[in-house]
Amino acid sequence: MKTLKSLFAQMPPPYARILAAALSLAAGLAVALVFDYLLYRIGLPSKPFIYVSF
């Protein structure tokens, strides 16, 4: 965390804001993908259909 703060301190303010927004967007997309996958997996049956029918 200290490395990230020192990186932001060395950059000009406009670039630091752009980098912060890009990192925030990337983190949000990563969380959205995890939730999307989890909700997809919850909707799948626990056993494949072929085994249930026999």
Image (cartoon, helix red, strand yellow):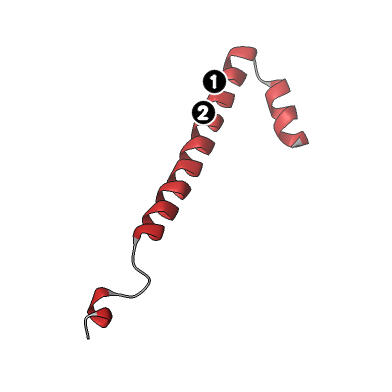
- Residue 5 % position (x, y): 73, 29
- 29 and 42: which one is in front? 42
Label 2 Cα crowd, 10 Å radius (few <14 / some 14-19 / many 20+): few
Residue that appears at 22% across and 81% down: 53
* Tag 2–tag 1 contact (CB < 8 Å): yes
- 3 and 46: which one is in front? 46
Cα–Cα span, label 2 and label 1: 6 Å
Which type of secondary structure does the marked residue at label 1 adopt?
helix
Residue that appears at 49% across and 43% down: 30
Residue 15 shown left or right of residue 47 in the figure: right
Q: Look at the image and tell me in which quarter the N terminus lies.
A: top right
Q: Look at the image and tell me in which quarter the C terminus lies.
A: bottom left
Residue that appears at 50% across and 36% down: 28
When the figure is inspected, residue 44 is found, relative to residue 53, above or below; the finding is: above
Pick out the residue farthest to the front: 53
Figure quadrant of residue 50: bottom left
Q: Which amino acid lies under the numbered mark 2 shown in the image of this protein?
A: Ala
- Residue 44 % position (x, y): 34, 63
In the picture of the structure, the residue carrying the numbered disc 1 is: 18
Figure quadrant of residue 12: top right
Residue 52 shown left or right of residue 8 in the figure: left
In the picture of the structure, the residue carrying the numbered disc 2 is: 22
Q: Which amino acid lies under the numbered mark 1 shown in the image of this protein?
A: Ile
Pick out the residue farthest to the right: 2
Residue that appears at 54% across and 24% down: 21
